[in-house]
């Protein structure tokens, strides 16, 4: 058997030029070959960045959508195709992480502002004495976990559902019950912090 015959029987990976052609073709079937070729590597990198399978999968799909929509902006003279795609995937993950950090900072500021409010009643004095942390820790364990994830780690309700492997509806119910407990323990002022989270 000649080398040509052997080569024809082996499925050779596409070359860089072929992948670029597939990308620029605007043909979904050809773009699928680009996805198949690069998605395992990009997914591995996204997983290292976010450390969550579901989120990494979502970011991978979002990245490839951006790649598809911006295919005409790729310039082979400036970078290899994988490098260009990697930058898009990394920026997508960074945007996600920054958004998550922004939620953490927003919730922290809201909690800090509440904690620093001047007491206006004996009940408020009692709250200050007990401390915000102790009141939160008085929640049931499954409620406390959701509050910690939502307000101290910045997870959305959908992300909490994935992390805890429970339905989003259950997360919302437990959040609502936690809210009722905190409103009773700390008064109406604090409820806005919880109600503004989604």
Image (tube, rainbow, N blue to C red):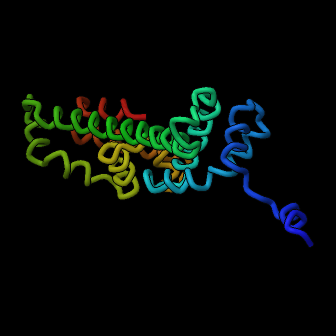
On screen, residue 98 versus residue 172, left or right, reads left
Q: Residue at x 28, y 36 (%)?
A: 107
Q: What x and y, as percent, mark residue 163? A: 48, 54
Q: What x and y, as percent, mark residue 175? A: 41, 43
Image quarter where the C terminus lies is: top left
Q: What x and y, as percent, mark residue 49? A: 43, 52
Q: Is residue 7 above or below residue 175?
A: below
> Of residues 134 and 152, which is closer to you in this image?
152
Q: Is residue 162 visible?
A: yes
Q: What x and y, as percent, mark residue 146? A: 39, 49
> Of residues 91 and 128, which is closer to you in this image?
91
Q: Is residue 121 above or below residue 160?
A: above
Q: Residue at x 42, y 36 (%)?
A: 95
Image quarter where the N terminus lies is: bottom right
Q: How many numbered tags mark residues here?
A: 0
Q: Residue reaching furthest bottom? A: 1
């Amino acid at each position: 058997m000649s080398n040509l015959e052997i080569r024809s029987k082996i499925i050779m990976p596409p070359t860089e030029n072929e992948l670029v052609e597939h990308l620029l073709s605007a043909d979904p079937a050809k773009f699928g070959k680009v996805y198949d070729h690069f998605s395992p590597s990009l997914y591995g990198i996204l997983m290292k960045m976010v450390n969550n399978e579901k989120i990494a999968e979502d970011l991978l799909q979002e990245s490839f959508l951006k790649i598809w929509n911006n295919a005409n902006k790729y310039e082979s003279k400036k970078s290899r195709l994988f490098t260009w795609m990697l930058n898009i995937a990394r920026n997508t993950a960074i945007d996600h992480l920054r958004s998550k950090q922004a939620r953490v900072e927003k919730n922290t500021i809201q909690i800090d502002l509440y904690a620093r409010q001047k007491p206006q009643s004996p009940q408020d004095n009692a709250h200050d004495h007990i401390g915000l942390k102790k009141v939160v820790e008085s929640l049931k364990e499954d409620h406390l976990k959701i509050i910690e994830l939502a307000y101290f780690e910045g997870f959305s309700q959908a992300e909490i559902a994935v992390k805890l492997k429970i339905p989003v509806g259950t997360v919302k119910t437990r959040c609502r019950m936690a809210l009722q407990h905190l409103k009773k323990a700390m008064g109406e002022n604090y409820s806005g912090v919880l109600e503004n989270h989604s």
